[in-house]
Structure formats: C-alpha cells, structure tokens
Amino acid sequence: MSAPLLLTFNAGSSSIKIGVFSIVGGAAVRIGDGLIDLRRAPLRLHLDNCEQRVDIALESSITDDLHDAIDETLGWFAAHFPIDRLVSVGHRVVHGGDRFAGPVVLDDGTVAAIDALVPLAPLHQPQCLRLIRALRHLRPHLAQSASFDTAFHRTQTDTVRRFALPRALFDEGIKRYGFHGLSYRFVLGELAWQLPQFARGNIVAAHLGSGASLAAFEAGISRDSSMGFSTLDGIPMATRCGALDAGVVLHLIRQRGMSPADVEAMLYGRSGLLGVSGISADSRELLASTRPEAREALDLFAFRIAGEAARLATTLGGLDGLVFTAGIGEHQPEVRAAICARLAWLGIDLDAQANERNARVISSERSRIAVIVLPTDEEQIIADEAVALLHQDTTTR
C-alpha cells in the first residue's frame, strides 16, 4: 500500500512555502517542496520533487479568497506528486495568543479563534487564514491542522511577558508572546542531536531572515525573546522597525497627522533595513553596495542584535552558546562576524575561516562561548505536529 501524503503551508507576506511529506511509519518524511512567489506577476510556482526543479508561471492571480491560485497550484502538484493520496494539510499560524498552547485540528471554532487574533499579527495572520479557508473550500473533507509560532514560548514567566502597563491590560492579553517558535523548536532539536553538550546549557538563538528575532533558552526551555506583543518588536528586520519608543507613534499620529493605518504600513513595510538604507530590504544587496546608507543599515542591524543577545544573556544568568539560523543567520558570514565582534567582551572569538564557509561550529578554540550555525526547517515541525494530530484523531475514533 502506498504511503499517504501530507502538505504543509507556511504563509509569509511575500511568499507561500509548501512542504510535501510522505507519512511513513507514523513519521513525516520530506519528498519535495514548493514555493509561490507572490511578488511576481504572473505568479511563479517553484517545484522541487528531489529529482528535478521546475519553475512555472501561474495563470491565476492573487484574489481575496485565493481559490484560483491554490486550485491551480494543487493541479501542478498533482503532476509531480501523488496528490490523490493526500490526507492532511498543516499550516503555520504566527499568533496563537493565550488560546493556543500547541497544535490543533482546524474546525469552525478554531478558525474563528485564529481570526480573532488578526489584530495581533495583521501582516501574517490574514495570509494563513486565506489559505486555510481556500483549502476548506477546495478540499472540504481534508483534515487540516495549525501549528503556532507563539506556543513554544508559553514557558516564559509572567515577569518576562509583562509590560509596565495597568494590570488589567495584561489580563486582557496585552503581553509579550514571542514568535518564530517553530523555527526555534527545530533548531533546538538539531542542537540536542548534533551538539548535546551545548543543548543542555544557556543558549541564545538568532533567527535572522526577512523577519528576525532572538530567543533565550535554558536546557531547551524558552525563557525570553526579543519579539513581544507583535511581530514588530525586537531587532530591526527587512522592512519592520523592531523596538520603537511608543512616543514616536504618538508623535506621528498627533503632530504629523498620519493615520493609524499609515503608521502601521510604514512600521511593517517601509522600515528596517529598507527604511534606513533607502536602497533595499535584502541584506545581500546591502552587503554588495558601496553606498554609506547601506553600511549604516547593516551596522544598525548588527548593533541591535548584539545588544539584544546581551540582554537575553542577562535573563539566563550566563551564556554557553549563540546559535545563528534562517537565511541571513545561515548564509551571511559578514553579518555574523559583525554581531560577534560586538560580543567579544562576553568571550566570543570567531574562527574566521570556519565562519566564511558557514561551518556548523564557527567559534575558535579560545572562545568561552560556542557559536553555532544550524539550518532551520519550520515545515518539518508543522508536518510532525500534523502527523501527531492525525494519529491522535484515528486512535480516538
């Protein structure tokens, strides 16, 4: 009997990553990938079935319900994968609020609860909801599940999660949640497998991609993070501002006459590396540029990351390892070197050659703190959680 199939959907602001997994012996085994590039016109679908890569121009366009685009995408997947054996779809959902402490099966009630959290993640939450609803429309009998970025940080104490605001607001849900939990969960699992001597210690992990954050872990348990109430908080990102004095927002609205919607659009879409450089949101383009604005944006990026890493080390009461992951963290040695240079006072010393070749361990033998580069795989965590829920559902019938 052929193995059943599982798809994962990881919706971002500019792309949709799709993982294809075969369920073998109760485990999710990746057999391919897809990516819909939402920035291209026409839309582009990149498919990889582990034997060949194809690049397809989609005839459909982005609509409010995504029905046409997802239907066409599933059609192309069927030409390269045994979609007739598809039994489940798992989704990454950025914000789970206080409602969701782990993965859930999607039904009318859970979808409505996820929808109610849209104001907490206006850039990401609507995207995943569109996908969920499109697949419910196109494949109404298909099991779907949600995995939440915030769930992994539920182990943080109220002291860490609390803002210095009236207590009633905390009780109403205005608190620090933390994000990128699926990425951190995967990375910590890899660390425990590959370098267990460090996994048991105090670790700061830096997920550095278009969205970026840092988090502090004690023996694999989340204790603090740079992102708080929303995905705007913490360090500067590709187009997001990072931590910002709330007085700036008040000033822009009251003195500059900007509407809340205009401020939101600026903070999410025209700030960060793009805003400071005025050139690009892509750190690769900034590294290649000779313009001083590009260097200033990168210097600010490294400065804020190093400062946040030091703050998180304070939460932990010491630091044994610094882990870099995600696109920038895994592939850009210049950025890693700039961050670590600012943390040399902690005892970090890089092996320049190991850093240049993106080795797994890039700290020198003299370094008091291990510096590690590990790839992340959010789709694998989504798939693992979806399979666990699918198994739980079949055993409780």
Image (cartoon, grey):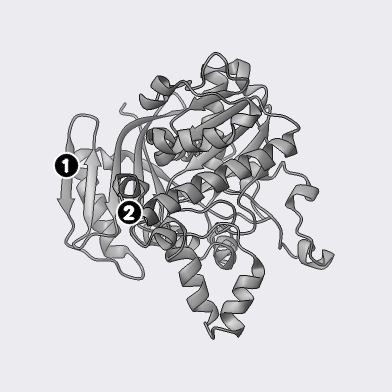
Q: Which residue is disc 2 drawn over?
A: 291
Q: Quadrant of residue 157?
A: top right
Would residue 329 be visible to someone looking at this image?
Answer: yes
Q: CA distance from mark 2 to mark 1?
A: 36 Å
Q: Is residue 377 above or below residue 37?
A: above
In the image, taking residue 204 as reference, residue 327 lies left or right, namely left
**The residue under label 2 is which amino acid type?**
Arg
Q: Which residue is disc 1 drawn over?
A: 54
**The residue under label 1 is which amino acid type?**
Val
Q: Is residue 251 above or below residue 118?
A: below
What percent of the width, then of the height, locates residue 28? 42, 31
Secondary structure beneath dot 2 equals loop
Would residue 145 be visible to someone looking at this image?
Answer: no
What percent of the width, then of the height, locates residue 238? 43, 54
Say which residue appears at 50% left-offset and 61% top-offset: 125
How many badges with numbers are in the image? 2
**Depth order, front residue of 25/236:** 236
In the image, taking residue 20 as reference, residue 324 lies left or right, namely right
**Depth order, front residue of 34/71:** 34
* Quarter occupied by the N terminus: top left
What percent of the width, then of the height, locates residue 145? 50, 48
* Quarter occupied by the C terminus: top right
- Does the CB distance between marks 2 and 1 fall below 8 Å? no
Say which residue appears at 46% left-offset and 61% top-offset: 129
Q: Quadrant of residue 88?
A: top left
Say which residue appears at 59% left-offset and 59% top-offset: 230
